Image (spheres, rainbow, N blue to C red):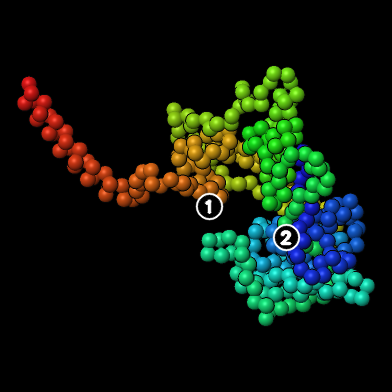
Amino acid sequence: MAIGAQGGRKAGVDGEDAEGVLTAVEFLHAAAEDEKYDIGKNVVVVGGGNVAIDAARVSVHCGAENVSMFCLESREEMPASDDEVEEALEDGVEINCSWGPKEILKDENGKVKAIVFKKCVSVFDEEHRFSPKYDENETKTVECENVILSIGQAIVWGGLLDGTAVELNRNMTAQADTFTFQTAQPDVFVGGDAFTGPRFAIDAIAMGKEGAISIHRFVQPNSTLTIGRNPRYYVELDKDDFKVESYDTAKRQIPEATRKVDPKGFKDDYKMLTEEQVKTETARCLGCGATIVDPNRCVGCGICTTKCEFDAISLKRERPECSTMYRAEDKLKAILPYTIKREFAIKKANKAAKKNK
């Protein structure tokens, strides 16, 4: 089972059952089927991620005249990519940071007429866990015809698991073995977002392949799910071909953007990578031999941290107590005392050897 995270989360505020309140997943699905989907003239999108940006921009392209985004995070904390935010602003989307939904107001017919926001003073606690805090005295009311909630995806199982032994986590993902993807119900296997929560499509594709192998083995008589399979261990770096100069020095390749012809249409205004850009991009791989990223088997060469986007990768010691480490700039402070101590030990050993002769 790989049903994905096909549902959208609600905000848990009064009035979100009003007509005109949609999740981003619902809206984007509807707009994909009908590019002339009537989303109204005034739209408010709640959320600050890339999906919220998608919902806001698609609203503009569906004909909305006033589209506003409201998110808990400050501009620096917004999870949306900078280029996505820039494109939304170019499309005329208004972005409002540090606001959280308080209430959705309905008219006498049960239709959305406005949404009330409260000021968010902080999103994370001291340990950087999601724990938003609000100033209930500072509010903002925004009139609108439709509200799109883009605050997360949800997995909707329905009655699919009824009568099975499959166990679920608190976030409704299924529990399964991380190698075979077999659940507590032996003949049920899971993969993709239904197992990991929302992640990249390539992760789901990889799990689909391994899950299919597990199922094929499961239905064979006298077979095993694990023996003889690729454990996806780290393959050691080839130290005989370890030259920094031989690795990537090119920057990440970006498709060229063209001028928008129809700001209200759905024509993609990006060109593809050129043939030369494709060759340059594919040549950026470090070729370190890793079949999977396993921090416990990392050789610590650190080259990946210099070749990827700044701060995209960082090395962290999970067990610093196992050894004493020094900064490269301070290495002499550690080496010199040991060198002197070792020198005396060698001289002492040599004297003892001569005396024994």
Residue 119 location, x and y as percent?
67, 75
Q: Which residue: 75% across, 52% down?
A: 154
Residue 227 location, x and y as percent?
61, 23
Q: Quadrant of the N terminus?
A: top right
Looking at the rendering, which quadrant does residue 282 occupy? Answer: top right
Q: Count residues near mark 1 (Cα–Cα under 10 Å), then give few for <14, some for 14-19, many for 20+.
A: few
The kind of residue on which mark 1 rests is Asp
Q: Name the residue carrying label 2.
A: 151
Q: Say whether marks 2 and 1 touch (CB < 8 Å).
A: no
Label 1 sits on a secondary structure element that is: loop
Q: Which residue: 27% across, 49% down?
A: 333
The answer to whether residue 25 shows anywhere in this view is yes
Of 203 and 175, nearer the camera is 175
Residue 249 location, x and y as percent?
53, 42
**Relative side of 252 to 1, left or right:** left
The kind of residue on which mark 2 rests is Ile
Q: Count residues near mark 2 (Cα–Cα under 10 Å), then give few for <14, some for 14-19, many for 20+.
A: many
**Relative side of 36 to 162, left or right:** right
Please name which of the two marks, 2 or 1, marks the residue nearer to the observer: 2
**Relative side of 82 to 67, left or right:** left
Q: Quadrant of the C terminus?
A: top left
Looking at the rendering, which quadrant does residue 212 occupy? Answer: top right
Q: Name the residue carrying label 1.
A: 311
Q: Which residue: 89% across, 70% down?
A: 111
Of 55 and 157, nearer the camera is 157
